[in-house]
Structures are given as structure tokens and as C-alpha cells.
Image (cartoon, rainbow, N blue to C red):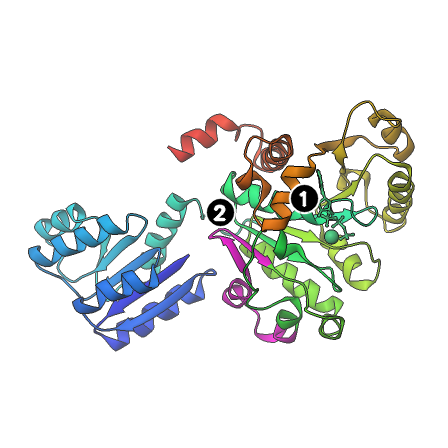
């Protein structure tokens, strides 16, 4: 979430910057100045929240603020003002100001207002609740693990209103960010590893390509040389921070079994091995299952996804379940055109072709994950009510 603060008072501005940056992964910009700065900051920066401090403006100026709000309906205004008279409060609310708080404002009061707005925007997450780590792993190259990791991440954010980060742990030739974005990543896993000592929520958030306000991707290192910077202990620190900040941490880890993916798997709540319905995939899936067993992972941690599923082939789902000794958790159908269009354009498939069977199965998967975690009662009805 982007927050801009304008204040003529340098001390207030500094305090607000400290309060807002200390809690969460928000982009905070501070502007010293008065009423004349409101319009340019709103137009040039497009913040989600614009905080106006020490500007107890008159009726005419409030009307201007109202006009600005009409041009930018997605922007929320907070005013910090020593004038708390009922008349002023009512006029400010009429002009579209969401909250009027005292100035100088305390840390609790401003963070409370921001949390309410985040909740409204669907960005809120229960404080202190640990997020879940979900890892997708191809049983064989080209199984669709990266495609599914990126698209499940997007569906959890766009449809389920969860706060999600996707991390590309393919140390060589990772490509996850390209499946959902055409923006150049501001930083990558190796940059984060190099700065691990000063890593905090805002550094992590600023290292992500943001596909949605509540969905960011941490790209893989640019080349194998850079990848050498990443060590297993960095993964510990990074995931510990990530689960404190995000509802879901989705990992795309590739097929290598060195210290880094094993660290990631150790921290993982659910491993989703991705396979297709041909013998080479099933053979490698069987090998993978025995590696999981020797690493001591219980079967409940492992959930099989059969990708590019088509009924009526030589091999049935029953055959797969029998061979691998576990149920298939989910099938994702084959749809070459829709997936190729999504991958080529770098646009999530659920956004590009909503009614395609692949999109539907990804949306169902995201919904099931959330229902399992939040409890069955949090189904479509409760989500409808929350959105209303
Ligand atoms: N359900 C699907 N229907 C049609 N095509 C698909 C489907 N899922 C994936 N693909 C295609 O398969 C290609 C390979 O997918 P992806 O890169 O996700 O595989 P991977 O398992 O991550 O492979 P790697 O081991 O190379 O990382 C994608 O570019 C996409 O075009
Ligand atoms: Mg991949």
C-alpha cells in the first residue's frame, strides 16, 4: 500500500514517517508543505492513502478536496487536525475524508486508522498470525510447477484477498516473475541475501515486483554467479520474516536437492509436487516421494497435483494413486492456448481468460487452501458478506 504524508511541520512529518515505516511493508513518502502540495502529490504519486497534517482547511478548500477525491475515488484521505469541532468533522466527512485524527497524532491512532483502511481494501491480515508456506516442485522439467506457483499466488491475492508473496528459489534460470508480470524486478533473492543483516518488512516489500498491492514476487538471482551469494541460513531468516508479514508464502523451488531447497522444504507447510500423466513423470514422482520420506516429511505435508490432466488416457488417476501410495489432491486440465497466451503475455491466466477450465481449477485450488486454513465456515457466503 502506498501512503503519502503532507505536513508543514517537519517534526510531525518525521514522526509519521517513523510510525508508518516501522509497522508493515508500506511504501511511505513524506512531503513538507501545505495545501498547495495536495493536488500535485495526488496526481503524480497516486497514493492509496493521503495523510494531510496540520491543515484544518476552510469550507472552500474542503470542496476542492472533495473534487480531488471524485477524480481519484481509489484514494483515501486522512486529516490530522487540532480542530475536532463537530462542525468541522461533519464537513470533512462530507468532503470524503475517511478519518480525522488529532495532530500531532500518536502511533497507535494512526496505525489503527491505516489498519482499518487496509482491511477495507482487503490487504489486512491478522496481526501475529503466522502465514503458511506452500512449495511447488516439478517432478520433472516442464511439469508446470512455476506456472501453477505464480497463478495460485495470484488467485490467493486477487480472489481470496490474502496477502501473498511468491519467491523464486530456482537459483539458476528462475523465471517465475515473468509468468505474471512484465516489469523488471527491483531486486532479487541474491540482493536480499546480500542485505540479510538489515532485512525487514519494508526492504523485503521494496524488493518485490508488485503484481497487485497484496501480491508481490521475489525474483531469482540474475545469473549463477549472483546465486552463489544465497546461503541456507539466509533462507531461514527470509522465511521467518515472510511468514510474519504474509498470509501465504509460495515457493517455486525447481528440482535440485541441495542445501537451499531442502531448507525451504523443511520450513514448508505443504509441498505440492507437480506431475503429468506419463510414465517418466510418474517414475520421477516416485523417486521424489522416497526422498521426502527419507527427509522425514509426513504424507500429510505432501499434496500431489496432476497438471495437464486429460481423461481417458493410458494411465488413470487411480494408477497414479496406487503407484505413489497417496491420493491426488487436485487435477489441472490441459489448455494449451489459454496457458500459452498467459505465459507469453506475462498475465495471470485467471485474469486473462476467466472462464477457462485451467483458471477455474486454479481458483478452486486457492479457495480450498484458504478454506482449509481459515476453517470451513469461511466459504463463499462468509466471503460475500466480508466483501459487501
Ligand atoms: N495446464 C496446462 N495446460 C497447457 N500448458 C501448460 C499447462 N501448465 C503448464 N503448461 C505449459 O508448460 C510450460 C512449462 O511450465 P513451467 O515452466 O511452469 O514448468 P516447470 O515445472 O516450472 O519446469 P522447469 O523444471 O523448467 O522449471 C509452460 O510454459 C506452459 O506453457
Ligand atoms: Mg519452473
Question: If the image is split into quadrants, where does the C terminus sit?
Answer: top left
Q: Position of residue 378 (x, y in %)?
A: 52, 31
State the residue position of label 2.
126
Q: Quadrant of residue 197?
A: bottom right
State the residue position of label 1.
148
Q: Earlier in the sequence, mark 2 or mark 1?
A: 2
Where are the magenta residues, as a range?
A: 194-217
Give the CA distance from mark 2 to mark 1: 26 Å
Q: Position of residue 375 (x, y in %)?
A: 58, 32
Asked if disc 1 is less than 8 Å from ligand 1, the answer is yes
Please report the residue visible at 62 percent of the width from the left and 70 percent of the height from the top.
Answer: 192
Give 192 or 158, whichever is nearer the viewer: 158
Name above or below for residue 362 compared with residue 145: above
Question: If the image is split into quadrants, where does the N terminus sit?
Answer: bottom left
Q: Position of residue 88 (x, y in %)?
A: 11, 53
Q: Which mark is residue 301?
A: none
Name the secondary structure under disc 1. Answer: helix
Name the secondary structure under disc 2. Answer: loop
How packed mark 1 is, by other alpha carbons closer than 10 Å (few <14, some 14-19, many 20 or more), is many
Q: Is residue 199 magenta?
A: yes
| Numbered label tally | 2
For discs 2 and 1, the disc positioned in front in the rendered view: 1
Please report the residue visible at 7 percent of the width from the left and 55 percent of the height from the top.
Answer: 59
Left or right for 320, reference 17? right
Left or right for 361, reference 53? right
Please report the residue visible at 32 percent of the width from the left and 53 percent of the height from the top.
Answer: 113
How packed mark 2 is, by other alpha carbons closer than 10 Å (few <14, some 14-19, many 20 or more), is few
Amino acid at each position: 500500500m502506498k501512503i503519502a504524508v503532507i505536513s508543514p511541520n517537519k517534526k510531525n512529518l518525521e514522526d509519521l514517517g517513523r510510525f508508518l515505516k516501522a509497522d508493515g511493508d508500506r511504501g511511505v513518502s513524506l512531503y513538507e508543505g501545505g495545501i498547495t502540495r495536495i493536488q500535485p502529490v495526488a496526481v503524480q504519486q497516486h497514493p492509496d492513502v493521503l495523510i494531510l497534517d496540520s491543515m484544518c482547511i476552510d469550507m472552500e478548500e474542503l470542496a476542492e478536496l472533495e473534487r480531488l477525491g471524485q477524480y481519484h475515488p481509489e484514494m483515501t484521505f486522512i486529516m490530522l487536525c487540532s480542530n475536532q469541532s463537530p462542525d468541522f468533522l461533519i464537513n470533512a466527512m462530507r468532503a470524503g475524508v475517511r478519518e480525522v485524527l488529532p495532530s500531532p497524532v500518536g502511533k497507535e491512532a494512526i496505525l489503527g486508522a491505516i489498519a482499518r483502511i487496509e482491511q477495507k481494501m482487503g490487504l489486512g491480515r491478522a496481526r501475529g498470525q503466522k502465514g503458511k508456506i506452500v512449495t511447488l516442485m516439478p517432478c520433472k522439467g516442464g511439469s508446470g510447477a512455476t506456472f501453477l506457483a505464480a497463478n495460485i499466488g495470484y488467485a490467493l491475492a486477487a480472489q481470496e484477498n490474502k496477502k501473498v508473496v511468491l519467491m523464486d528459489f530456482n537459483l539458476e534460470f528462475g523465471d517465475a516473475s515473468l509468468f505474471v508480470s512484465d516489469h523488471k524486478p527491483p531486486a532479487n533473492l541474491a540482493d536480499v541475501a546480500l542485505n540479510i543483516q538489515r532485512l525487514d518488512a519494508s526492504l523485503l516489500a521494496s524488493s518485490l515486483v508488485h503484481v497487485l498491492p497484496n501480491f508481490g514476487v521475489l525474483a531469482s538471482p540474475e545469473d549463477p554467479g549472483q546465486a552463489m551469494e544465497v546461503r541456507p541460513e539466509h533462507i531461514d531468516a527470509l522465511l521467518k520474516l515472510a511468514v510474519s508479514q504474509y498470509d501465504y508464502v509460495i515457493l517455486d523451488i525447481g528440482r535440485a536437492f541441495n542445501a537451499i531447497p531442502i531448507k525451504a522444504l523443511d520450513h514448508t507447510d505443504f509441498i505440492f509436487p507437480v506431475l503429468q500423466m506419463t510414465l517418466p513423470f510418474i517414475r520421477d514422482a516416485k523417486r521424489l516421494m522416497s526422498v521426502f520420506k527419507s527427509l522425514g516429511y509426513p504424507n500429510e505435508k505432501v499434496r500431489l497435483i496432476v497438471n495437464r490432466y486429460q481423461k481417458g488416457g493410458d494411465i488413470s488417476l487411480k494408477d497414479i494413486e496406487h503407484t505413489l501410495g497417496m491420493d491426488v489432491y487436485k487435477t489441472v486440465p490441459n489448455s494449451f492456448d489459454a496457458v500459452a497466451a498467459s505465459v507469453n503475455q506475462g498475465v495471470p491466466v485467471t485474469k486473462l481468460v476467466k472462464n477457462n477450465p485451467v483458471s477455474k481449477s486454479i481458483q478452486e485450488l486457492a479457495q480450498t487452501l484458504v478454506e482449509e486454513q481459515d476453517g470451513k465456515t469461511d466459504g463463499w457466503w462468509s466471503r460475500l458478506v466480508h466483501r459487501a
